[in-house]
Amino acid sequence: MVSGGSRSLTRVAERRWDDRPSGFRAWERTAGLGDGEEVWRWAREELLAWRVKTRSGFTVRPDAPVAEGDRPTIVAHVFGLAIREPVEVVEVVDTDDRAGFAYRTLPGHPVSGEEAFIVHRAGGSVELTIRSLTRAATSWRWRAVYPLLLIAQALARYRYMSALRVRAPRR
C-alpha cells in the first residue's frame, strides 16, 4: 500500500531520489540489515513502529505505529535535557518489498526539513535507507546553534544506521 495524500520531498516510494529540492542539505545512506524473509518481516515491523528512532535514544509520543497525517512529538535526550521535536508524517509506504515513512518538521523543531526511513529488499538482502533534507529553523534560538545541531544530526544518523542492523534476526 502506498498512502494517498501529499508526497514527501524525500520520495519514500521511489528507489532513486533524483529530484532533491534546492535550499536544503540533502543526505542519503543505505546499510545492509541481513538476508531473508525473517529479517524483512522483522525490519518492516520495527521500522513502522518507530523503532529506528526509539532504539537511537529518542522517545516518540504517542507510542503508536506510523500513520500518515499523525503529528507525534519526538523527544531527543541530550545531556540530561529533553528537546521536543514536533513533526508530521507526510508519507507512508508499505508494499511487498518496500516499507517506510517520511516526516516533515513543524514549528518548534530545532531544524527545518524532512527525514525518511525506508527498509527495502535488494534481491535476497534487506537494506535500510535514510534520506534527509535539512536547513536552519526559522527560530533565532535554533538558528544560533545550527552548526552544533548538524553535529548532533550526524551522530543521530550513525545511530539510526545501527538501530535495526544490530538487532536484526540472524539466519
Image: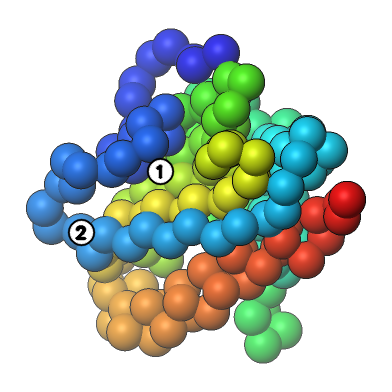
Near-viewer residue (94 or 140): 94
Q: Closer to the observer: label 1 or label 2? A: 2
- Outermost residue toward the left? 22
Real-space Cα separation, disc 1 to disc 2, in angstroms: 13 Å
What residue is pinned by disc 2? Answer: 24
| Residue located 39% across and 14% down the image | 5
- Give percent across and percent down for residue 93: 53, 25
| Residue located 63% across and 71% down the image | 159
Evaluate whether residue 83 shows in this view: no
Near-viewer residue (33 or 20): 33
- What is the quadrant of residue 74 in the picture? bottom right
| Residue located 35% across and 73% down the image | 142
Near-viewer residue (136 or 31): 31
- Give percent across and percent down for residue 155: 53, 79
Local crowd size for mark 2, using a 10 Å CA cut-off: few (<14), some (14–19), many (≥20):
some
Q: Amino acid at mark 2?
A: Phe
Which image quarter holds the N terminus?
top right
What residue is pinned by disc 1? Answer: 104
- Give percent across and percent down for residue 25: 24, 64
The earlier-in-sequence mark between 1 and 2 is 2
Left or right: where does residue 4 sit relative to residue 23? right
Q: Amino acid at mark 1?
A: Arg
| Residue located 61% across and 64% down the image | 160
- Give percent across and percent down for residue 39: 78, 43
Disc sitting over residue 64 in the figure? none
Evaluate whether residue 32 shows in this view: yes
Near-viewer residue (77 or 119): 119
